[in-house]
Amino acid sequence: MKKIVALLLAVVMLLGLCACGSTSEKNEDTKAPEQTAANDASIETEKEAAPDTITVLAPPVMNDYANYVRTAAEEYVKTHPNITVEVIETTWADHQDKMTTMCLAGEAPDISYSETGWLGTYVEMGVGVDLKEYMDADMLADYDEGTLSYTTLDDTLYAVPLYISIQALGGNKAMLEEAGVDVEKVQSQGWSYDEFLEAIKNGTKDGTWGFVFANQGITTADFVNIFGGVAGLTGSFSDELKYAYTSENMLNLLKVMEEITSSGYMPNYTVAAGERLVMLQKGETMVTGKAMPLFETNCRTSTAAVQNGTAEEGFIEMEYVFLPMPTLDGVKANCYGGGGLLVPFRNANTTDEHLKNVVEFYHYLSSGQCAADVCDAVMLPALCESGRKAQENSELVQSEGNAIASAYCTSILVAPPTGITAEQSANAETILNEVIVPKMEALIAGEATAEEVYKIICDEAFALFGEENCETGLIG
Amino acid sequence: MRKEKAPRTLAKKQFRFTAEDGTGYLFILFAMVIFAIFTVYPLVSAVITSFQKYKPVGSEWIALENYKATLKNALFWKAMRNTVIYTVITVPVSQLIAFGIAIMIMPFQKKTQTVFKAIYYIPAVASGIALSVVWQWIYSSSPSGLANQIMTFFGLPTQNWLASSKTAMLSLILMVFLSSQGQNIIIYIAALMGIDNSYFEAAEIDGANFIEKVIYIVWPLCKPTTLFLLVTGVINSFQVFVNAYMMTGGGPDNNTTMIGLLIFNNAFKYGKYGLACAQAVLLTIVIAALTALQFKLNGDDVEY
């Protein structure tokens, strides 16, 4: 009896393990007929190609983007019947962690959303794909050449930008005017740091802050990446490909942060990323950052909800204005452009045939109507000819002032220099996360001075990059 | 000749594989395979990876570089220091709190005991993530946060609980004191119930008061439980991750970056998997050494 029980246990275990191991195979088997059934008769006349599955990791780039990709894929497979598209939906909170984990596990998704700053880390992992090897010249020609520097590392093109988001400040128009700001002038010509400081001073009243900038955890990095424009810091590397966050500009930025956080015009407590827009919509702040043109849609929706009585408690009627970043005396007007992109990935056993299929579908998602729809949602122009053509039919619901501000910010966008290596990019990301963000947290908490933080950043950067590869004077 | 033959026969007898042995091995096969797949394999794999510059498409053997980089890394030592501070405060104090509460619950009737046990155990049932969300609201640095409202009520200035180096670690420790005692309390109650009543009767005859009974009867007889809770507490504390990840993200200025969070960040945020594995191996060695030390210091007169 004992032997029978033991044998039974062993058999159950083996069956369990076999079942685990064969799950994915079975899934593919069961999906293939469904896929075949979904295709029409014209498929038979198509060139026969081996069945292939493409996985896409999709965060909410726009509302319900995962479902958007699923719908787009249904259209795509009509002409590519051998392709099956699997979409893995993520949230902004878990997207990057999930993407990194999948890449490290050797199961990188074929296509995933990424930001330009993250790209170096994945290229260093070896999962990047040299797009020029797999993308036809005709396809490549569709994309604006000037934007490709955002996605080029080691002189290799690893992705094409889907959009370049202009990220600066946003405000409540009525409050700004009450604080003495000529909103139209600022939107069309920019403003100085002194004008900005005067405005947030006037805008600070009982229950309303003049300025709020999200500063909880990793969002503190936005103080350098985006607010850094105030001091002329437009990226981690200068045109000479030297590390830029050791320059005098960085010290100036830190001094500005110190001044603002101790001024009483900004909360002396941490504000999470999700809170900043809500504070603006509730009239708890006059200006907020980081802000994008698309916030206009959010504010219009909340204002409509206030008007019809369905808004949550505390929300007010307001008109959102997108504002350029102010600059210190002597600093050229500039704007941070955050590249939002889809990236194709490879794994150890990825075949050339599969990569060709992936890149073709990748091009489909990054251009034409797909690019236009995403860019419409984020109120930005497409970065490819086919996308712009598709956008001609779109109706952008944007106020005149915000359209002018968007155009102005786009005109002063500073593209990253060409020639940055993947190692430089990954090292810059490491020093940002391990040194700059923690030290800035200490600065914001009033536990370190600008000079102390600057010295630590310089020491760490000199050790990592070598002093000769770091900027020490004033840039720009 | 005879002398040579005798041990051979004995050896043969000792190691003969019988049918009964086979049945025994079959019984433990299931557990052993699971143990091998989910414990031994990841451990061996982590050790191997710790000597590599790990890349999913082809790793590079770099010998001890990850270990050298770890030992030279100031953040690793800061994380280790934070973890030690967190452990040294939370583990013994938590045990004292749990022991005290268990003693206070014991005199109640069984039904009342059950109610208290359930109340104290509820936080252990909730997920760490859910708990962290509640605590984030409690520690919100805006004036509307619960902790700040209490401060304001007593006329004290509001605090930047999780964003100030002065209060961030304290906030995490306080969170452990107030929400993580359930399991320890239940284990201590089980230990207290195992103490024979005759000891207390004898002590009463000798005129011992409550404190003396606790010191001379309860505490010594609970020593195996205390050692068990101490060892598991230290192991869990060195591996703490969720609290720091959810509440502070390791900030401000890495003052709440624990070693578990550092390993997670290196592996899953920066893609430095080899480095993370080296740090995990070092953590394992530290935990193993501390566990051995605890058994050496406290385990001589404890039977398991």
Image (cartoon, rainbow, N blue to C red):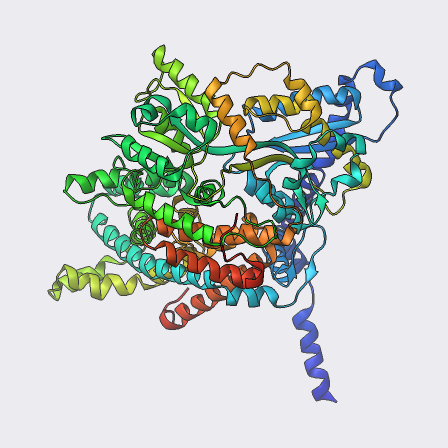
Q: Quadrant of residue B83?
A: bottom left
Q: Which residue is drawn at 65% across and 72% down?
A: B14
Name the spot of residue A237 as percent of width and height, x first.
Answer: 57, 50
The answer to whether residue B264 shows anywhere in this view is no
Classify residue A193 as left or right of residue B277: left
Q: In which quarter of the image is residue A159?
A: top right
Q: How many labels does the image show?
A: 0
Q: From this viewpoint, which residue is outermost toward the top? A: A308
Q: From this viewpoint, which residue is outermost toward the front? A: A330
Name the spot of residue A455 as percent of width and height, x first.
Answer: 43, 60
- Closer to the camera in the image, B143 or B243: B143
- Closer to the camera in the image, B261 or A334: A334
The answer to whether residue A456 shows anywhere in this view is yes
Q: Which residue is drawn at 68% across and 76% down?
A: B11
- Closer to the camera in the image, B256 or A251: A251
Query: Does residue A22 lie above or below B242 as drawn?
Result: above
Name the spot of residue A266 as percent of width and height, x first.
Answer: 31, 38
- Closer to the camera in the image, A133 or A263: A263
Q: Which residue is drawn at 77% across and 19% down?
A: A78
Name the spot of residue A470 as percent of width and height, x first.
Answer: 55, 58
Query: Does residue A457 lie above or below A319 as drawn?
Result: below
